[in-house]
Amino acid sequence: MLVEIDDPRDPRLAPYISIRERDLTGRGDGRFIVEGKVTLGILARRSRFQIESVFIGESRLEPLAETLAELPGDVPVYVAPQAVMDQVAGFAIHRGVLACARKGEVLPVERLLESQTLLVLNDISNHDNVGAAFRNAAAFGAGGVLLDERSCDPLYRKAIRVSAGSALWLPFHHGGTGLEHVAALKAAGYEIWAMTPRADATPLPEMPVGGKIAILLGAEGPGLPEALINAASPVRIPMSPGFDSINIATAGAVALSRIFEARLA
């Protein structure tokens, strides 16, 4: 349903006003914003989330025709000149494509616990790292992602983009504490690999791959707290002498790749 708009004060555009500031302060209305052609296509075709509206620049109407045709008929598509779009958003929307969707109910932890492989994020406050972690989880066949309450929102606009849209369809649970997640995983029969540079941790290539496995990652810098490491199986990635750590999303990718390849063998 195409709706032409030429007034940046149009109340129907309220969810898109100053989205950068809303990203930084958090949204309390149950909505999130998706940006870009690729992620809009995933939102339309694969996502479990309800699309509320789409907001595009006039020049994007023809290139997006196929994707827009796949939207439910009752979803309004607001079309505006680029200058109006930029004024509403509060910065230049170079991609000219935005959409607003509803988060809906939080998936319960139990929905994820049948997967053979899970990625578990603890205190990850960097949106790029969360997005990259989701992308890696999707690439290497993880069945979902657990995020504790201190980790940032995977439905933050930039996190979705960095995840290559996988945050829109890969099941995840966001909430609770790391210790609560570890307890739930153990009760469900998972072996938990706590990724750490500790010298006494088992080298990743020596870890057997069998049954259900959860990979636990901690924040850049401090890493995982001792309580979580001691509650799991400490695992380290062998590295060159004098260098003991890599980006947490990269560490997750290395560990996930090891499990993915072993399960294929």
Image: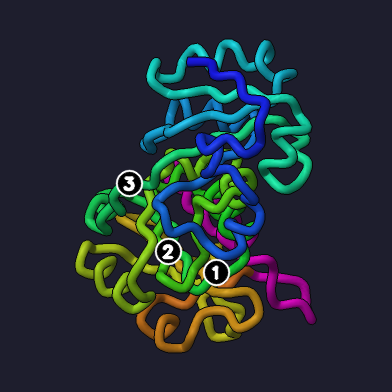
Disc 2 element:
strand
- Disc 2 to disc 1, C-alpha distance: 8 Å
Q: Which kind of residue does numbered mark 1 sit on?
A: Ile
**Residue 264 falls within the magenta-colored stretch:** yes
Q: Residue furthest bottom?
A: 226
Q: Residues within 10 Å of mark 3 (few under 14, many from 20)?
A: few
Numbered circles on residues, count: 3
* Residue that label 2 marks: 147
Q: Which kind of residue does numbered mark 2 sit on?
A: Leu
Q: Which residues are magenta?
A: 238-265
Circle on res. 28:
none
Asked whether disc 2 touches disc 1, contact meaning CB atoms under 8 Å apart, the reply is: yes
Is residue 22 something one can see in this rendering? yes
Residue at 64 percent across and 47 percent down: it is: 162
Residue at 46 percent across and 88 percent down: it is: 226
Q: Residues within 10 Å of mark 1 (few under 14, many from 20)?
A: many
Residue at 50 percent across and 74 percent down: it is: 123
Question: In the rendered view, would you say 251 is above or below 54?
Answer: below
* Residue that label 3 marks: 104
Question: In the rendered view, would you say 256 is above or below 188?
Answer: above
What is the chief secondary structure element of the magenta stretch? helix
Labels 2 and 1: the sequence-earlier one: 1
Side of 130 where 173 appears, left or right: left
Residue at 20 percent across and 68 percent down: it is: 187
* Residue that label 1 marks: 124
